[in-house]
Amino acid sequence: MVESTVMDPQKDPVMDPQKDPVKDPRKAPLQAPLQDSPQEPLSRRERRKLEVRTRILEAAMLLFEERGMAETTVAEICERADVAHKTFFNHFPTKQHLLRDIALAFVGRLVGRIEETAKRRGSTAAKIAHFFDQVAEETANSGPTHRNLVTEIIHVAHQVGTEPEQARRLHDAFGILIKDGIAAGDVSKRHSVETITEMVLGAFYVLMFDWAYLDGYPLGARAKAAAKFLGEAISDKR
């Protein structure tokens, strides 16, 4: 549950519960792993802040993979990132804020992967199969705590206030893939771009949710089956 992600002041006494309200981290000048770089040139001080923030995020990701989120403390993240406790809380007042940025980076990675897939040669069905297979393989080969991390990321990414943004980024990326397929003539025009996009996005969500929440879920096999079904459903061949 998200409530469990808030730092415990007793475990991390440097946290001040009376701190000023946190600014929306999505609006903060950050360069989290695999997120888009700021378009305007940054000052040396701003670049330094981004470097520190990214270092904290990367250290947290590694520790979450190695130890799990519940077992990872702020002190351990600070030690791995080589930053002071005060510096950590300047960037992330709670673990929930940290996870939200990780979720943003996670979605950014998926969007980038979809965009790369769209540039591949081959049919749209083959591109969808490649994307599903690649994500399934990387997920299956991840560390033993990755399931808990993905579960928490999914939960945080779909909180009120972030869901529309996250869903829209993935929706738009898949939508471009489908539009390109229609233009190439290998995706059927029997259904709208919106309908086909939602079908592909929905299949992806179901795969990730089921893998995150169902023990023993055969992600690889189900990803191949889903991609095959989608390929046949969107095909222009009757």
Image: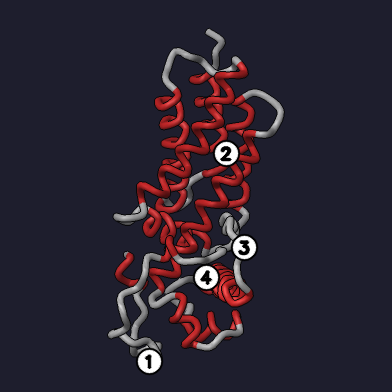
- Secondary structure beneath label 1: loop
| Residue that appears at 44% across and 59% down | 153
The circle on residue 142 is none
- Which amino acid lies under the numbered mark 4 shown in the image of this protein? Phe
| Mark drawn on residue 64 | 4
Instruction: Give the residue pinned by disc 1.
Output: 13
Q: Residue furthest top?
A: 238
Q: Tell me the mark number nearer the camera, choosing from 3 and 1.
A: 3
Give how far apart the Cα atoms at labels 2 and 3 are: 36 Å
Q: Earlier in the sequence, mark 3 or mark 1?
A: 1
Which disc is residue 132 wearing? 2
Q: Residues within 10 Å of mark 4 (few under 14, many from 20)?
A: many
Q: Is 158 in front, or is 29? A: 29
**Which comes sooner in the sequence, label 4 or label 3?**
3
Image coords of residue 194 (percent x, y):
41, 27
Q: In which quadrant of the rendered view does residue 9 lie?
A: bottom left
Instruction: Report the mark closest to the observer, 1 or 4.
Output: 1
Near mark 3 (Cα within 10 A), the count class, few <14, some 14-19 or many ≥20, is few
Disc 2 and disc 4 in contact, CB within 8 angstroms: no
Real-space Cα separation, disc 2 to disc 1, in angstroms? 44 Å
Q: Residues within 10 Å of mark 1 (few under 14, many from 20)?
A: few
